[in-house]
Amino acid sequence: MGPGSSSSIEKFWQGFFHLTRALVTSPVPVIAAVSGHAPAGGAVLAIHCDLRIGVHGNYKIGLNEVSVGLPVPDCIMLALEHLVGARVAQRLGMTAELLPVEEAWSCGLLDELVEPASLMLRAREWARRLASLPPVAMNRTRMLARARLADALRPEADALVATDLWFSEETQAGMRALVERLSKR
């Protein structure tokens, strides 16, 4: 597996960062129903949603990018900090720690834990609850709380930085080591 071309990697990152910005700026609340493990990109998408509901079980969630030599991009660290606070975000980002779901719930990375069979029911209950609130008041308050994060998201600029990091010697060495470990399984 090669690193890909610079233009294809940049295009991937642009799409990814446009998606995270769309989640943050969505005109309606977005609820992440996390049904199992959510490392790296799965965690990134969840942290950009308004609410995150996970399931009890032997699952882990977190940003493990550093473990393969990829620094966590600024915009993703800001989103993580928005949820869990600066001190916890720093620890989780720099250590690449994947948290058991109970710990993720206790630090604010997940908002709620439910039994797997009730995950979608609970997500729909939250959606109905939010939809029952006065829409202008709820949405204005919601967007105000997310304004700093929304203003900081710059998909094209973030993609350029992420592409440069992707092609760094450290990241490429980490990716090769990851592929080697996975191919031995």
Image (tube, helix red, strand yellow):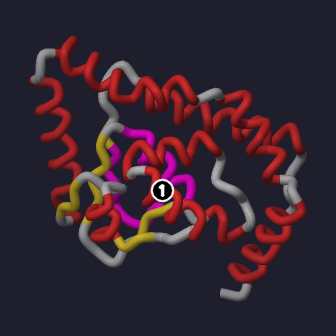
Which quadrant of the view contains residue 74?
Answer: top right
Please tell me whether residue 130 is drawn above or below residue 55 in the rendered image.
Answer: above
As drawn, which residue projects farthest toward the top? Answer: 136
Please tell me whether residue 93 is drawn above or below residue 30 in the rendered image.
Answer: below
Determine the residue positioned at 72% across, 28% down. 156
Q: Position of residue 170 (x, y in %)?
A: 84, 65
Q: Position of residue 56 (x, y in %)?
A: 24, 70
How many tags in the picture? 1
Whether the magenta-drawn stretch holds residue 44 is answered as yes
SS class, disc 1: helix
Please tell me whether residue 57 is drawn above or below residue 125 in the rendered image.
Answer: below
| Figure quadrant of the N terminus | bottom right
| Figure quadrant of the C terminus | bottom right
The residue singled out by tag 1 in the image is 89
87 or 108: which is nearer to us? 87
Judged left or right of residue 116, residue 167 is right
Q: Amino acid at mark 1?
A: Ala
Determine the residue positioned at 43% across, 47% down. 47
Judged left or right of residue 168, residue 130 is left
Judged left or right of residue 127, residue 18 is right
Whether the magenta-drawn stretch holds residue 25 is answered as no
The span shown in magenta is 32-49
As drawn, which residue projects farthest toward the front? Answer: 87
Determine the residue positioned at 38% across, 39% down. 49
How crowded pointer 1 is (Cα within 10 Å; few <14, some 14-19, many 20+) is rated as: many
Determine the residue positioned at 46% across, 61% down. 38
Q: Position of residue 92 (x, y in %)?
A: 50, 64
Q: Position of residue 108 (x, y in %)?
A: 31, 55
160 or 177: which is nearer to us? 160
